[in-house]
Image (cartoon, helix red, strand yellow):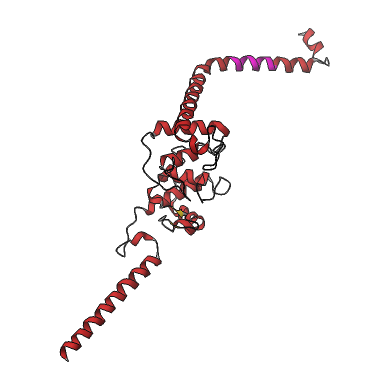
Amino acid sequence: MTWITARRRHPLARYAVLLLALAVFGIGYTAFAQFTRPADAALAAGKLDDVAEGKSLFQAHCSSCHGLNAEGTQTGPTLVGVGAAAVDFQVSSGRMPMAQPGPQAPRKPTAPWVNDETTRQLAAYVQSLGGGPQIPGNEQVDPKLGNMAKGGELFRANCIQCHNFVGAGGALTQGKHAPDLNQASDRQIYEAMITGPQAMPVFNDTTITPEEKRDMIAYITGVREQKDPGGFGLGRIGPVTEGLVVWVVGISIMALAAIWITAKKRQKS
């Protein structure tokens, strides 16, 4: 003890203690890494398998428009940096592969080769090219965990200009349109907000937080179940269709009534 006490004030003592601490930490970390390596290796192998399979799928079904390395062509944009969420949205909704070039890719039945596994693999490959938004988890898109009233406020503030107050969709310029949201899944709604497909802007987490996105999903899915107390929904597009129906039906009834009255008067005369 006297020997240690005599040397603890030595100028190099602090460095010796620091080196000893680093050695202990390094040995402990190495032991822990060796213990967990089998699980990590299996996970990495699974991801590499998905990327390899996804590359094969991409080259077979997507490269004609987006290029062999997703660098983009004259008919399709680059996919570097768009992320797995964009792939999952476009492919799972049938928008991609696109049937023919146009101002906007419409929703349609998915291609025969598309399923949950192939979509995941294709998304993994595109994600490996340059990162980007990831596919959201089940908890992030669960409408049961959202606040429908708050979601309605956010939806009316950010979305009704294009999608209508109940998500029925609407026309845009240059042949584009805001799609009907009644067919979109919870995950597709979230993915559309973070990737901004077609003419839609991107609502990142600084603009609308993940919790607020979940609130909006709760509102969008909730209004689907609402009944129309006034009778026919008429597409739930709003006063335009209601006014058109009233005008057409009302004018038709008045015209028929005028013809009937005129015919009656002629018969009496």
Task: Tell me where residue 118 sits by quadrant.
Answer: top left
Q: Nearer the viewer, residue 12 or 84?
A: 84
Q: Indicate left or right for 229 with 99 as reference.
A: left
| Main secondary structure along the magenta-highlighted residues | helix
The relative height of residue 157 versus residue 82 in the rendered view (above or below) is below
120 shown above or below 77: above
- Drawn side of residue 11 relative to residue 165, left or right: right
Residue drawn at x 50%, y 39% as measured from the top left: 65
Where the N terminus falls, by quadrant?
Answer: top right
The image quarter containing residue 72 is top right
Q: Position of residue 174 (x, y in %)?
A: 50, 56
Tell me where residue 96 appears, x and y as whole percent.
44, 41
On the image, the x and y values in percent for residue 169 come to: 42, 56
Magenta span contains residue 205: no
Placement of 9 over or under 109, stated as above or below? above
Decide which of 169, 228 is in the foreground and name it: 169
Image point (48%, 46%), residue name: 192
| 7 up-or-down from 261: above or below | above
Point out the stretch of residues depicted in magenta. Answer: 21-30
From the top left corner, tell me how far across and down residue 22 is, in percent: 69, 17
Name of the residue lying farthest toward the left: 268
For image coordinates 48% across by 43% down, the residue present is 191
Residue beneath the point at 73% across and 15% down = 19
How many numbered discs?
A: 0
Q: Which residue is at the far right? A: 11
Quadrant, the C terminus: bottom left
Query: Is-magenta flag for residue 22?
Result: yes
